Amino acid sequence: MAMTNSNRANPNRANAKRSLGSRLGAWLLLLVVGGIAAAALVYREPIEGYAQVGTSYAARVTCSCRFVAGRSLEDCAKDKLAGMELVTLVDDVEAKSVTARFPLVTDNTATYREGYGCVLEPWEG
């Protein structure tokens, strides 16, 4: 007569639990990614509008700080308003311009012009 150990877990049952957990995790991930994509589509225009205004402001103010006041880009970057953490700044010393970028959405450039100060490049679109 063969003895069975009732304390030993059924390997098929453990695999089924792991499989269920991984499927649930995959569905949850898909749901989160889908929700983010849907929100991005629904709120695309407001996001683009705020990003356009934010990058325009950052480019213009930083250009003035950099080429009118003569401060370093790092020092000027400290003047960004709260909520503008995603806006990155890049200066071109030869062209006397500053470009502000909001990732994957928009960028704007302001250029220093003698007698006019810093002027934004025209918007396209």
Image: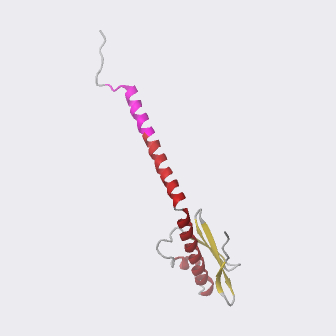
Residue at the extreme top: 1
Please state the horizontal and vertical placement of residue 85, each as a whole percent of the image. 50, 69
Q: Quadrant of the C terminus?
A: bottom right
In the image, which residues are magenta? 8-23
Relative to 47, say whether 117 is above or below.
below
Magenta stretch holds residue 74: no
Please state the horizontal and vertical placement of residue 123, each as a whole percent of the image. 66, 73
Please state the horizontal and vertical placement of residue 10, each as a whole percent of the image. 36, 25
In the foreground, 96 or 30: 30
Question: Which residue sits at x=52%, y=54%?
Answer: 37
Relative to 34, say whether 11 is above or below.
above
Which quarter of the figure has residue 64? bottom right
Overall secondary structure of the magenta section: helix
Horizontal arrangement in the rendering, residue 31 relative to residue 52 (left or right):
left
Please state the horizontal and vertical placement of residue 86, each as a whole percent of the image. 53, 67
Q: How many marks?
A: 0
Magenta stretch holds residue 16: yes
Question: Which residue sits at x=40%, y=26%?
Answer: 12
Which quarter of the figure has residue 124? bottom right
Horizontal arrangement in the rendering, residue 10 relative to residue 107 (left or right):
left
In the foreground, 38 or 106: 38
